[in-house]
Image (tube, grey):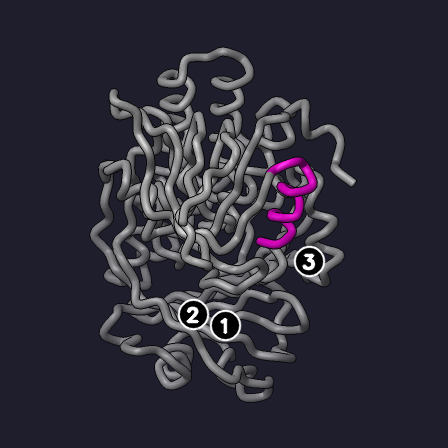
């Protein structure tokens, strides 16, 4: 059987951070929005969790940070870098209203964004797997086709389809979005959640082919990860993690032994970073669907929230202000690329694990400079009128 949903101005495919945030911002502007996802509401996903200043700034501006805090997400006011024999602690200073960093579990962050989108007026449908996009005779994307859990075919017409469906994006493949930049490095990561681990903030430890870190998150837990070449991580798990942690500077090995270990670990075997073309006739990409880099830079969530607003601004300009689609959406990609290229390049080098102890401080400084430039750009964005009032 087949059912046809009402037509929408925008269909967003993928209800994780980038997609849910995009749907939220569009709905707050009064657009008719459908947010669909093949998964279930509130499920977990692979994540570094860490929000950088830009991500915290976005949640603050959107009126959602208080919900993250109310969920028990600890405030992070200190970051410690360790490499070779050097230890560099940094106490966070207030900047553009950001006084602390946060690293919410995805079982907390994603539902908050989805609920905000629904409260703003978006229709939300879980359990719909995208099977393709619809096009008119000129090749312009005019909607989606999907399959519900009960086997029904779903057809939805839309003025613009947004792919926010991750690194294996069905939307990106369906529209044949070309890769415009591809990284050369592949790192793997294995991670788990320790309970009661002694830490006072983010920790990033760097040695060649042996990086590790600590990210405090909800419920008194800390995400502990190890990153290295895929051959070192293998299938992942506690063995590779503890061996790599033992090679990195500091006393993390001792502290892990005193904390409650995870029941299981998760492993990402890695893939090269990429930047895809982010728009076309009737479609756009946001989040990992259009731009992915190795998680060792811990910037993916911040990118997702950043680009959600940049894309939403472009779509609103088209559908509400009468701007040309080509100009508005190519403008979105131009800003995305301008803010992302330096981050992409330096992260690709770091993820290659081919640097030396002497080189890594300079690479981390480049990473920090790129993040600072991004923060200034986001802080300078004019307020979005529909964001002046947070939905009840």
Mark number, residue 212: 2
Q: Nearer the viewer, residue 324 or 61?
A: 324
Residue nearest the viewer, comparing 256 with 312: 312
Real-space Cα distance between discs 1 and 3?
17 Å
Q: Residues within 10 Å of mark 1 (few under 14, many from 20)?
A: many
Q: Which residue is mark 1?
A: 224
Using the image as rendered, state which of residue 144 and residue 382 is in the foreground.
144
- With respect to residue 294, does 256 lie above or below? below
- Mark 2 is surrounded, within 10 Å at the Cα level, by few (under 14), some (14 to 19) or many (20 or more) other residues, namely many
Of residues 45 and 334, the one nearer the viewer is 45
Q: Which residue is mark 3?
A: 75
Helix, strand or loop for disc 2: strand
As helix, strand or loop, the secondary structure at mark 3 comes to loop
Residues rendered magenta in the picture: 110-122
Residue at the bottom extreme?
Answer: 257
Query: Looking at the image, is mark 3 or mark 2 earlier in the sequence?
Result: 3
Q: Is residue 189 magenta?
A: no
Q: Residue at x 38, y 32 (%)?
A: 284
- The dot on residue 68 is none
Q: CA distance from mark 1 to mark 2?
A: 7 Å
Residue, far front: 1
Residue 69, quarter of the rendered image:
bottom right
Percent x, y of residue 80: 54, 62
Residue 6 percent location from the top left of the image: 52, 33
């Amino acid at each position: 059987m087949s059912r046809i949903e009402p037509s929408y101005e925008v269909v967003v495919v993928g209800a994780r951070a980038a997609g849910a945030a995009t749907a939220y911002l569009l709905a707050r502007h009064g657009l008719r929005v459908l947010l669909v996802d093949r998964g279930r509401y509130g499920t977990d996903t692979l994540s570094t969790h860490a929000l950088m200043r830009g991500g915290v700034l976005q949640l603050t501006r959107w009126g959602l940070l208080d919900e993250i805090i109310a969920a028990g997400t600890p405030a992070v006011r200190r970051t410690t870098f360790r490499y070779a024999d050097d230890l560099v602690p940094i106490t966070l200073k207030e900047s553009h209203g950001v006084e602390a960093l946060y690293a919410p579990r995805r079982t907390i962050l994603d539902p908050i964004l989805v609920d905000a989108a629904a409260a703003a007026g978006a229709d939300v449908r879980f359990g719909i797997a995208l099977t393709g996009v619809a096009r008119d005779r000129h090749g312009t994307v005019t909607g989606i086709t999907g399959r519900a859990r009960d086997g029904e075919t779903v057809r939805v017409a839309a003025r613009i389809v947004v792919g926010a469906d991750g690194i294996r994006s069905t939307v990106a493949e369906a529209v044949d979005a070309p890769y415009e930049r591809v990284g050369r490095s592949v790192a793997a990561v294995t991670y788990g959640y320790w309970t009661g681990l002694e830490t006072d903030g983010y920790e990033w430890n760097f040695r060649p082919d042996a990086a590790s870190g600590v990210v405090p998150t909800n419920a008194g837990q800390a995400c502990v990860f190890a990153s290295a070449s895929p051959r070192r991580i293998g299938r992942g798990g506690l063995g590779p993690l503890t061996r790599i942690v033992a090679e990195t500077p500091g006393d993390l090995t001792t502290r892990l032994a005193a904390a409650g270990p995870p029941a299981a670990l998760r492993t990402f075997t890695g893939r090269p970073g990429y930047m895809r073309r982010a728009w076309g006739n009737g479609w756009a990409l946001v989040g990992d669907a259009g731009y992915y880099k190795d998680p060792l830079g811990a910037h993916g969530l911040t990118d997702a929230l950043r680009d959600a607003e940049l894309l939403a601004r472009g779509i609103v300009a088209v559908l509400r202000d009468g701007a040309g689609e080509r100009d508005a959406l190519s403008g979105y990609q131009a800003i995305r690329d301008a803010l992302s290229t330096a981050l992409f390049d330096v992260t690709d080098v770091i993820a290659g694990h081919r640097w030396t102890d002497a080189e890594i401080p300079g690479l981390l400084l480049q990473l920090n400079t790129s993040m600072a430039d991004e923060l200034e750009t986001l802080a300078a964005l004019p307020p979005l009128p529909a964001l002046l009032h947070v939905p009840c």
